[in-house]
Amino acid sequence: MNNQKSVLIFGANSDVAKQCILQYVKKGLFVIAASRNVKSLSDFSEKHQLESKIKVVFFDATDFSSHQKFYKDLETKPNVVVYAAGFLVQNNQAFEDFDATFDMIKTNYAGAVSILNIIAMDKSNKNLERIVGLSSLSGVRGRKSNFIYGSTKSAFTQYLAGLRQELSSRKITVNVLVSGYINTKINEGLELNKSLLMKPDYVAKHIVNAGNSFTIVPNWKWKIIYWILKLSPEFIVAKLP
């Protein structure tokens, strides 16, 4: 790859991450696409004729003991890291099934902290310039319809906020993308307001072109909702679904 910059994407099989792959490649970056579903990613790579532009690698966010070796075995340490891995079960199921809740905790928060700590601690990687984590508006305030999933995203957002401060002296930028509804497979079957649904490529554009601001909220409608959630007193939030 010579001096070509690279981006490491975790959860690269998600709809948004796949759009990120296409957009990063278009910008001239080499993509290391990490996921448990390497077959789907390999098919995606072949379909879009990306074989020479991306490398598909196996990564399991929930297998913490494998993370150190995963990072050590990377032939090229990344310039940019995107954590897009995510897992969602509905609140009523999470209430009754702690295994499902624990899977959300491991994928959305603990797995992210595990691998991003390893990457952040590697001071020998002088190439690292940016880390972007995908969070959710569900993590802005606790609401009765989704607070268990939301709590994992809230924890991840706070982790990224502290990581941003920790890495600022090394001139490494940390961003969090706080997203509303996206038209992706994770939301299939849910009754969502179609006027608020964002396309994966639109969200990906905000990740790939992240600037210096910590919080990225794509779409003006979601920006309004974000600030309403953030600033509303508790008695109003308690009336929300």
Image (cartoon, grey):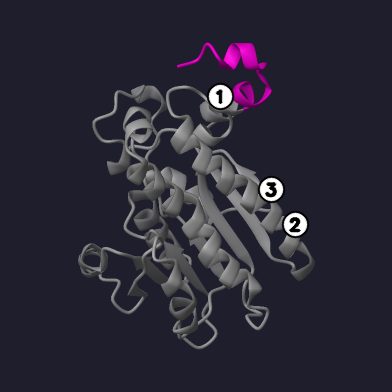
The quadrant holding residue 122 is bottom right
Q: Which residue is mark 2?
A: 165
Horizontal arrangement in the rendering, residue 48 relative to residue 174 (left or right) = left
Point out which mark residue 225 bears.
1
**What type is the residue that disc 1 sits on?**
Ile
Q: Secondary structure at mark 2?
A: helix
187 drawn magenta: no
Range drawn in magenta: 227-241
Give the x, y percent position of residue 74.
45, 82
Task: State which tag comes first along the sequence, 1 or 2.
Answer: 2
In the drawing, what numbered circle is on residue 76? Answer: none
Residue that appears at 41% across and 67% down: 25
Residue that extends furthest to the bottom in the rendered view of this protein:
2
Give the labeled residue for mark 3. 213
Q: How far apart in space, not on screen, are marks 3 and 2 (Cα)?
A: 13 Å
Quarter of the picture containing the C terminus is top left
Task: Give the image quarter of residue 23.
Answer: bottom left
Q: Residue 102 appears at what percent x and percent y?
A: 40, 47
User: From where the camera sits, is residue 136 visible?
Assistant: no
- Judge whether 237 appears above or below 64 on screen: above
The x, y position of residue 135, in whole percent, is 51, 44
Classify mark 3: residues with Cα within 10 Å, few (<14), some (14-19) or many (20+): few
Where residue 19 sits, quadrant-wise, is bottom left
Q: Dot 1: what SS?
A: helix
* 57 left or right of 211 in image: left
Q: Nearer the viewer, residue 180 or 162?
A: 162
- For label 3, the SS is loop
Picture coordinates of residue 119, whole percent (x, y): 57, 71
